Image (cartoon, rainbow, N blue to C red):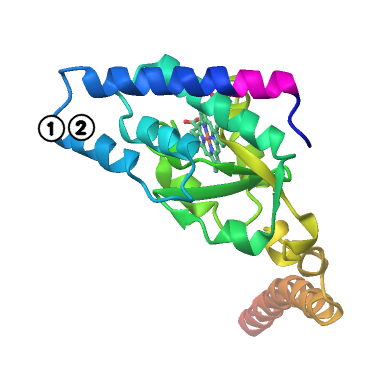
Amino acid sequence: MTPTRDDETALRRSRAYIYSQERQITDAGRHTGRAKRWIAEESRSPAGRSQDNRAIRIAAKFEGIVAPVLRTCLFRKKERLVAMAGGKVYSFEEVAKHNEREDCWLIIAGKVYDVSPFMEEHPGGDEVLLACTGKDATADFIDIGHTATAKELMPQYCIGEVDASTIPSKIAYRGVAPQDASPKPDAASGSAWLTVLQLAVPLLLLVLAFALQDFAKSKTE
Ligand code: HEM
């Protein structure tokens, strides 16, 4: 998708806003020397790391310090970049590589979510999110019964789509596979025998008990 003039203007405005916020963060005397050093280091980040990603990483790092408005702006910005890139398509293998707390990608309903900045905030904890890497997490997400609030949060973490043809079928649909769920012929006949035995044994015992009782009666007469 080619960016339109409007897109470019919005991008420029957004970038200017991010950098003005960044300056405010750096200038705010309440930050420690370490925080300032970190921002300075990030500012000298090598070519290849885009300025937008740098701003996003700064926001993620200063979780709790950075004003929520800045974070919202940064993530909207990220979302916009993805949309402008035409929504990147990742292979399953590529997505599966991002399986750490600081770098966690999820596949939900065909979309790829980079939830790394959300790990600590996630009300269900970071462990569940980590456990959902390397697979199609759609069913897990739905099973929890996430509310509309959760769904509203999702777009800001969306970084593109997964190429569905690259998802291994075993991983895409976890749970009992249809062929496992259907009883196998051998297993079926085995369980039939078990049922017959379960009924026959108590009956045999009953008959034996009556026979013994009869025998004992006839002895006493
Ligand atoms: C981008 C992805 C996700 C977002 C934005 C998200 C967001 C949320 C939010 C906002 C809540 C609070 C309850 C609600 O409003 O629904 C929540 C709870 C929870 N989430 Fe997620 N979630 C995501 C993915 C997942 C995944 C893949 C799992 C895997 C099982 C998961 C497991 C849970 C659990 C266990 C809870 C706690 C439910 C409870 O306490 O009743 N979440 N999530």
Residue 203 in view: yes
User: Which quadrant of the figure has residue 175?
Assistant: bottom right
Tags 1 and 2 touching, CB below 8 Å = yes
Image point (75%, 39%), residue name: 86
Quick check: 173 left or right of 130?
A: right
Task: Tell me the amino acid under the disc marked 1.
Answer: Gly
The secondary element bearing badge 1 is classed as helix
Front one among 211 and 9: 9
Q: Which residues are magenta?
A: 5-11
Q: Give the total of numbered labels.
A: 2
| Residue hosting label 1 | 33
The secondary element bearing badge 2 is classed as helix
Residue 154 in view: no
Q: Is residue 2 magenta?
A: no
Q: Which mark is residue 36?
A: 2
For the residues labelled 1 and 2, the Cα–Cα distance comes to 5 Å
User: Which quadrant of the figure has residue 66?
Assistant: top left
At label 1, counting other C-alpha atoms closer than 10 Å, the crowd grade (few under 14, some 14-19, many 20 or more) is few
